[in-house]
Image: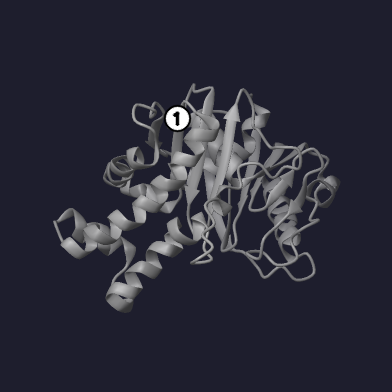
Amino acid sequence: MANYLSIDIGGTFIKYALLNEKQELVSRQKTPTKENIDQAIAKQVEAIVSDYSSRNKLSGIGISTAGIVNRDQGEIAYAGPTIKDYRGTNFKKTLAAFDLPVHVENDVNAALLGERWKGAAAGEDNVFCITLGTGIGGAWFDGGLLDGAHFQANSVGYLLYERDTQTNFEMRASTSALNHMINSKFGNDMTAKEVFKQAKQGDGPCETILSDWTREIAAGLAQIILIADPGCIIIGGGVSAQGAYLLEYIQKHIPAFLPEGFMKTDIRIAQLYNDAALYGAVYPFFK
């Protein structure tokens, strides 16, 4: 019986589950991500592996994580401010005592692999994945994951810097940006979920906020289409739960940023949601 432990490390939570012999995620759990003082996150992961390995026969460990990952070394090559002192964390060394194969992957790459394996991009050979969350992340698969010379390719959140506003793509198109727009219009009385609900019921101000926000998303997607020409783009992140309604807004705006007749890329909403990176983290054991 082959069980693989999959761990998804985010700035807020660490999620983890077993992938069983039927390729099903079972025994799901999550725990708050500790402030990363004195390698606290590496120690959390080590404790999770110790717990699961004491109760299950493991065949391998897959780790999905925020940050730029050198997957050959199993190390965080670069990390922004979301997780303190994360750069240089080496999970292969941390988990060496368990004598198990360990695969470490960037979380957006993992989400793309998961969607290509079990979700919205199943069978696609040229896929770009963009995740809309507190920030914006990107990943590109074209016969394999494309990382760039320094593992820094697809850092799409930094696109479209505007000198006048001193903002980039993710500052204007992330869910953090949406929440800021909502707070500016309604104060703290409305959530993004409520804005979507009221927009669906025809509320004008809510429709305007969503239109303005998704126009920013479309501007970034157009740049990806111009540079990469992917067969499909998968939109992930928690807001992807809005499904076809969100997609309708985005698709309406994209033509304004592309030459006439240029749009051929299929844009899809992620299907696996929070499970995408968990599947993708262990996918290399099955490919």
Residue found at x 49% / y 67%: 165
**Quadrant location of the N terminus in the rendered image:** top right
Judging depth in this view, the residue of 38 and 54 nearest the camera is: 38
Residue type, numbered disc 1: Cys
Residue found at x 39% / y 36%: 258
x%, y% of residue 223?
Answer: 49, 41
Judging depth in this view, the residue of 28 and 184 nearest the camera is: 184
**Quadrant location of the C terminus in the rendered image:** top right
x%, y% of residue 196?
Answer: 26, 57
Instruction: Classify mark 1: helix, strand or loop.
Output: strand
> Which residue is labeled 1 in the image?
232
x%, y% of residue 90?
Answer: 80, 51
x%, y% of residue 190?
Answer: 29, 71
Q: Is residue 167 above or below residue 285?
A: below
Identify the image's colour scheme: rainbow, by chain, secondary structure or one colour. one colour
Query: Position of 236 compared to 55: left or right?
Result: left
Judging depth in this view, the residue of 278 and 3 nearest the camera is: 278
Q: How many marks can you see?
A: 1
Q: Is residue 83 above or below residue 66?
A: below
Residue lying furthest left in this view?
Answer: 202
Crowd tier of the residue under label 1, counting other residues whose Cα lies within 10 Å: few below 14, some 14–19, many 20 or above = many
Residue found at x 28% / y 61%: 209
Residue found at x 74% / y 54%: 78
Image quadrant where residue 141 sits: top right
Query: Position of 140 compared to 258: left or right?
Result: right
